[in-house]
Image: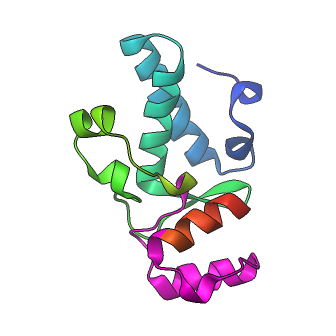
Amino acid sequence: MPGKKELPSTLRRSSEKAQRTWIKTHDAAVEEYGEGERAHRTAFASLKHSYEKVGDRWEAKDEPGPSDPQSARNDAAKRDHPSETFGGVDAYGHTRRELYDRASELDVQGRARMNKEQLASAIAQRQ
């Protein structure tokens, strides 16, 4: 099991439950696939089902579920044709207005002309 110092920095600033979710999934993925990028991707995919990245930490979503087009697709499609993930921002779980308000707090330029996906991408870049 990875120690606290081995957790990604955003997870070190997150709740204990978020940390346990990532660690448990990461450990299972290491057993299945070996240490490396695939185990990390699997752990973050599991984390993103129930948490979203807000600033420099992960916070629980109001409702669990896919947060972006990539996580909503089946495993083969994800692997063969990767798409944007919005850096942990829950594009599906928020309305455009909610994303617009977060973009406003982060002072994202041009937000008034952006759609949900563009707002989520811009928020991910500013966090």
55 vs 26, left or right, is: right
Q: What percent of the width, then of the height, locates residue 54?
A: 65, 63
Is residue 31 in view?
Answer: yes
Residue at 43 percent of width and 32 percent of height: 42
Quadrant of image for the N terminus: top right
| Residue 94 lies in the magenta-colored region | yes
Instruction: Check if residue 108 falls in the magenta segment.
Output: yes
Give the residue drawn at x 31%, y 39%: 81
Q: Can the viewer see residue 127?
A: no
Closer to us: 4 or 116:
116
Q: In this view of the protein, which residue sits in the foreground, 103 or 22?
A: 103
Q: Is residue 29 above or below residue 60?
A: above
Answer with left or right where residue 81 lies relative to residue 47.
left
Q: Quadrant of the C terminus?
A: bottom right
For the point 64% across and 78% down, the residue is 102
Residue 9, given in percent of the width and then of the height, sits at 75, 40
- The quarter holding residue 79 reads top left
Q: Quarter of the image holding residue 45? A: top left
Q: In the image, what residue occupies the spot 25% across and 48% down?
A: 73
The magenta segment is 88-117
